[in-house]
Amino acid sequence: MSKVSTDTDYAARDASIAINSYTTVLRRPRVPHDVFATYWRDVHGPLCSRIPGLGWYVQMHLDREQDAHLWPAIDGIAAFPNYELDGGVEIGFASKADQETFNAASHILFADEQNMFAATVAYALPNGSRTLVDRIPDPIPNSDDGIDRIHVHLGARGTDTAAFGDAVTRFAETLAADPAVVRLRLHLPDRYDNADPAPPAPNVDHLVPAERALIAVLDLGFETPLARRAFLESDAFLAAYAAQKPHIAHASAFAVSGVYTYVRVGQLTTAGLRGSRAAQLIERLGANNQVADDVRHLIETGTID
């Protein structure tokens, strides 16, 4: 059964997130990957989910072992040097007031980052991000859902934020128009300022080199790796990409190994309430009593009405 829709585009469902951030994460080198991933999903994830004001919270785990054919190398656009990641995070809000509520309480969250993260960098998106196309019906994935997903980080060639944003937007619109692309969400964050590092998590590195101060991120999905490879090797794509050389100096792609959704439209998912793996077990066993209102109320409040 196909994991994508051939006749419905769900992009509009993301419009309620007016303000967000895209955070890159790198695990501590002496924390084994399986321990890191489990802690992030089932300990840190539910903690973040409960911070007031939150409207959107998605963890996207990245796979360092995926093969290198994720994104084509072309003359004039180099890979970012010394750039490895273990994940990307979207945290979003329906309003500035909600973001301020979250920020006021977030110290309890940021104190936890040092347990697993060596570095986190929160790129601010005060005007939100844009989903150009999304043909994936499930709005709250909590798994490796079978979609071939990559995140492509693009670094600006110059310092003109508006010109870079305009060029990347046109490029993204060209990609999104191709039927091979089943998802494209574009992040165009503000220029990152090392003098004001974010998030303010203690004992975690938040600094970036100059080439990663002004970036864009393409959150891309294809039905299969074969579909991705065929698209990226097409003459139309390569011509559109080569035309970005005046605007893009660096590009690196990262394979997504799983997408875990904890808060959507201001509501806790089962993963946000119980932890990602617990939610998977509930779904696998069809334990519908575990998602009933009385159980949810008990877990949320510790009381039975």
Image: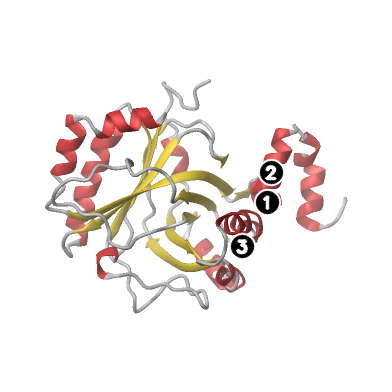
* Residue pictured at 11% horizontal, 52% vertical: 246
Measure how far apart labels 2 and 3 are at the Cα level: 21 Å
Residue at disc 3, secondary structure: loop
Q: Judge by depth and name the residue closer to the eye, 56 or 155.
A: 155
Q: Which residue is mark 3?
A: 52
| Neighbours of disc 3 within 10 Å: few (<14), some (14-19), many (20+) | some
Q: Judge by depth and name the residue closer to the eye, 124 or 266.
A: 124
Q: Is residue 120 above or below residue 183?
A: below
**Residue type beneath disc 3:** Pro
**Residue type beneath disc 1:** Gly
Q: Position of residue 299 (x, y in %)?
A: 78, 53
Callout in the foreground (1, 3):
1
Q: Earlier in the sequence, mark 2 or mark 3?
A: 3
Residue at disc 1, secondary structure: loop
Within the image, what quadrant is residue 283 found in?
A: top right
Q: Judge by depth and name the residue closer to the eye, 217 or 30.
A: 30
Q: Is residue 273 above or below residue 158?
A: above
Cβ–Cβ under 8 Å for marks 1 and 2:
yes
| Neighbours of disc 1 within 10 Å: few (<14), some (14-19), many (20+) | many
Q: Which residue is mark 2?
A: 279
Find residue 238 and name its label: none
Find residue 275 and name its label: 1
